[in-house]
Image (cartoon, rainbow, N blue to C red):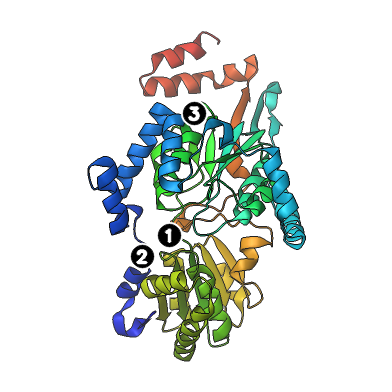
Amino acid sequence: MQIVKSNEVGKNAVLKLLKKPAFDEVVLSPKIREANKKLFGEDLSPSALVRKIVSDVREKGDEALFHYTKLFDKTDITAKDLIVTEDEIKAAEDSADKDVVESLKRAAKNIEAFHEEQKPKSWISYRAHGSILGQAVIPLDRVGIYVPGGTAAYPSSVLMNAIPAKVAGVKEIIMTVPPKEGKINPYVLIAARLAGVTKIYKAGGAQAIAALAFGTETIPKVDKITGPGNLFVTLAKKEVYGHVDIDMLAGPSEILILADDTADPILTAADMLSQAEHDPLASSILITTCETLAENVKTEAEKQVKELPRCAIASASLEKNGLIVIAENLEEAIEFANESAPEHMEILTKSPFEVLPKIRHAGAIFLGAYSPEPLGDYFAGPNHVLPTGGTARYYSVLNVETFLKRSSIISYTEEELREAGEDIIRLAKSEGLDAHANAVKLRK
């Protein structure tokens, strides 16, 4: 893990280090590149590979979906066993640790209570002469939730995606999950039942995103796709955007910790590792005003990582994307943090609530030593599906409004249209749209 001092390397060099790579800058491993050549006769880039998968599923439906599921997930599946049955959910409930299930229930209760507070309302405003203006807030009809499989199972992602959709009033919530040897993690299935998921399909990767976007013989087309995934899932969401809506283009997980000399190096290192264990591409950054803290956190992280079951992943993440920046003062540290616009930001300073008003760009902000990032991942209630890769500058956390749309309501009386008529005609003519003007003129 690299340590840099801003007063030695310069501010621009620090900002360059904080910059996140674009999705297409990710290089495929030699193993995947060799597989590309065997499968498609050429060494495809990630984007080109995803475009081919999406195109195949759009054109061939279930046939292509089953083909890529067998190819990538090593699962031979048919339409009959693509959908998760009640018996499978019941078996999951019977096999699960009851204490874990109770924790999931308590987390779901917190998440639902938080998101209930976000619900906007339709409204009507009565104007002079009896005219009406308003806004109708309408839930989407059908949404698709993508839940990652891969190296870990994420029942928490099920709760965070599906509960806001349920609170919003979405009628049909369908979920896709990559199977592992034809099965889905039992806690993922239990979380889906708790969160109000309507149907669950055993499909993952770019092929599942394509199936949700265009529909197949088995999987219905949705209006919006949400949920995080790997590089191929993200590129597939980018590819299908416009045919359906998406939540965001989520990249590898990130944490940025803003700390002064009051921070505990043991806890700070542990919090950095909480993200590093996700993925070798995950980013863990500490920005501090204290050189002693920087050195101690580096030492502590290197010590703690050896004790983790996912040591290889976390070590690779720290080596490639771990960074400690020593800023000249707290103001500069805050500037660097805002420029980074991280997914998760922890503020471990003497007075975190004094720093909070100065933070403009972060997906979720955790204040103080007793608000570690995993609190937000699992239990507190705010959503953990957050903008990554610096997109917190303009994207919001997933929320109830993600699953809603708005329609404007306009109803003028004859009298009020007459009063406004000349203005409308004049504006229409100024744009060269005489038919617009005539539609109003005929009513005057």
Residue 199 x/y as whole percent: 63, 37
Q: Tell me: residue 138, above or below residue 425.
A: below
How many numbered marks have been drawn onto this rendered protein structure?
3
Q: Which circle marks residue 216 in the picture?
A: 3
Q: How far is disc 2 from disc 1 in space, using C-alphas?
A: 8 Å
Which residue is denoted by mark 1 in the rendering? 390
Q: Residue at x 34, y 74 (%)?
A: 14
Instruction: Tell me the mark number nearer the camera, choosing from 1 and 3.
Output: 3
The amino acid pointed to by label 1 is Gly
Do the numbered discs 2 and 1 sit on residues whose CB atoms are within 8 Å?
A: yes
Which residue is denoted by mark 2 in the rendering? 19
Q: Secondary structure at mark 2?
A: loop
The amino acid pointed to by label 2 is Lys
83 vs 239, nearest the viewer: 83
Decide which of tag 3 and tag 2 comes sooner along the chain: 2
Q: Secondary structure at mark 1?
A: loop
Quadrant for residue 313, please give it.
bottom left
Decide which of tag 1 and tag 3 comes sooner along the chain: 3
